[in-house]
Amino acid sequence: MMRKLLLRLCGAALTLWLLVTLCFVLLHAAPGGPFDAEKSAPPEVVAHLAALYHLDQPLWRQYLDYLAQLSHGDLGPSFQYPDFSVNELVAQGLPISCLTGGLALLLALLVGVPLGTIAALRHQHMSDRLLMAIASISQALPKFVIAPLLILLFAVKLHWLPAGGWASGDGSSGNWRYVVLPVIALALPNLAYCARLMRASLIEVLQSDYLRAARSRGFGEARLLFVHAFKPALLPLIGWLSPALIAVVTGSAVVEQIFGTPGIGRYFVQGALNRDYTLVLGVVLVAGAMVIAVNVLVDGFRLWLDPRQRE
């Protein structure tokens, strides 16, 4: 088991290195540069900025310098935010992305599991078809469509919630209002998938032979559902949780950009638009490290649970 875990860790380190190298090459191969907007500045000023950030060095030298920085945990300076390092920007944005992503996943579970259960218990009835039709539409709608619709309804028409922005951090009681719409926009597709997954899993369990045998012995439907069917029906959902959590935390760039939420997704978009190489690389590296770490933990958990996989 230890050998497999060590091999998995070595594979994770190799994957992370390949990710950083590929992103570094692609960013520098793209047209434009971080100081192209400074066209009105004298050429000597632009040359000074390039020299300040070592962009006048050969590409291989820049790459080796960046790897040397990474070995000390330094993600480098930001070109777009000169008063902040990339470490500081990621430290500011990551908790916000984790907060909105975690709340979105919690909302998806709290609503999606009951809806999937109701649909499974009402299998082939009108309510089942209606719920699954709504879930299919919600899952099919992209987030860049859901977010403007939420702003139009709850901010522009009803004036219930702010259209965007983020809390000032002064602890005022209305700060939660800035979180609601981004969380709903992130939660809706996951909620729909969660409901569909729960429905399919519960229907399969309810039609299994051991539940039919239990039903023939006179067990009540409530006992069959909550004691014998609910736990095995939740297993596919548990397997879905880790990739879903990673997706809502690291894949929320569109939602954060639309609502002006200062998470790492918004920093990624702004960095890509302004050719802020170090900021984009820093966000990609953090997101990639999170994905790899969760996958390694899940693999270790499976090895611990299933002795057959240790052989």
Image: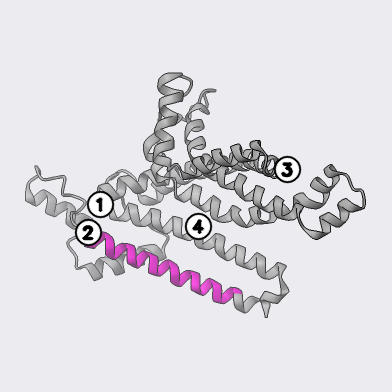
Q: How far apart are the alpha carbons under marks 1 and 2?
A: 9 Å
Q: How far apart are the alpha carbons under marks 3 and 2?
A: 54 Å
Residue with the most extreme right position = 217
Residue at which label 4 appears: 290
Q: Is the residue under label 2 in contact with that under label 1 (CB below 8 Å)?
A: yes
Q: Nearer the viewer, residue 247 or 126?
A: 126
Residue at which label 2 appears: 30
- Please report whichever mark, 2 or 4, sits nearer to the chain's N-terminal start: 2
- Per the rendered image, the range of residues in magenta is 5-30
Q: Is the residue under label 4 in contact with that under label 3 (CB below 8 Å)?
A: no
- Please report whichever mark, 3 or 4, sits nearer to the chain's N-terminal start: 3
Nearer to us of marks 1 and 3 is 3
Residue 232, x across and y down, in percent: 74, 55
Give the quarter of the image for residue 243: bottom right
Q: Secondary structure at mark 3?
A: helix
Tell me which residue sits at (55%, 50%) in the image: 245
Q: Secondary structure at mark 1?
A: loop
Nearer to us of marks 3 and 2 is 3
Residue at which label 1 appears: 275
Residue at which label 3 appears: 121
